[in-house]
Image (cartoon, helix red, strand yellow):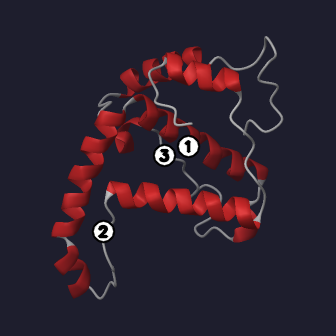
Amino acid sequence: MFRGTDWESKDAMNLGAEVSNMKKQWAERGNSDNPREIVKPVKFSKHSEVMTMKQLKDKEISHAFEVYCYESLIWGLVNPDNFKTYYLANEEKQREKMPEYKKAGLVVDYIPTLDQILKEGEEILKGYEKEIRELSPTPKKLQNDAIFLGIKIDD
């Protein structure tokens, strides 16, 4: 989505302004404590009932996924406590439904904790870098914008 962006140019995205605009949109949408209600889902049914791998490579569909993931990621980074509260409540509901899943014939090995999901996410990124290509380093301007917004940055 931002590949090839010159983060040092005067026209580079200002993360603070971007987040400010998103917060206004989220406030207009209502319950900003629930990411599933606040981040508008992407509707793919207008394209097809079933998506093929080829369709996922379509620029319009790929861009829609990127925008959805980007907004979701920003929401989580800006609202870490709300996200954690949401996830823990959802995790508990899923655990309570395990007998129902089993009865329906679904095989669910486990409901991952938030820490497990984050660890698995790190492993996916490491695998991507190993098998496909290394991720670009995070531009200093973007890091500074994130720190200004109160987002914790690990070195």
Is 3 left or right of 48, judged from the image as shown?
right
Task: Name the residue beneath numbered marker 1.
Answer: 68
Mark 1 residue element:
helix
**Label 1 close to label 3 by CB (< 8 Å):** yes
* Mark 1 or mark 3, whichever is nearer to me: 1
Residue at 39% across / 35% down in the picture?
38
Residue at 60% across / 70% down in the picture?
50
Judge whether 85 appears above or below 51 on screen: above
- Mark 1 vs mark 3, CA separation in Å: 7 Å
Is 87 left or right of 21, judged from the image as shown?
left
Mark 2 residue element:
loop
Chain-order first, disc 1 or disc 3: 3
Is 93 left or right of 18, judged from the image as shown?
left
Identify which amino acid the numbered label 1 is placed on: Tyr
- Mark 2 vs mark 1, CA separation in Å: 24 Å
Q: Residues within 10 Å of mark 2 (few under 14, many from 20)?
A: some
Residue at 68% across / 20% down in the picture?
141
Image quarter of the C terminus: top right
* Mark 3 or mark 2, whichever is nearer to me: 2
Residue 147: x and y in percent read 52, 21
Residue 41 badge: 3
Is 118 left or right of 71, judged from the image as shown?
left
Front in this rendered view, residue 122 or 30 = 122
- Mark 3 vs mark 2, CA separation in Å: 23 Å
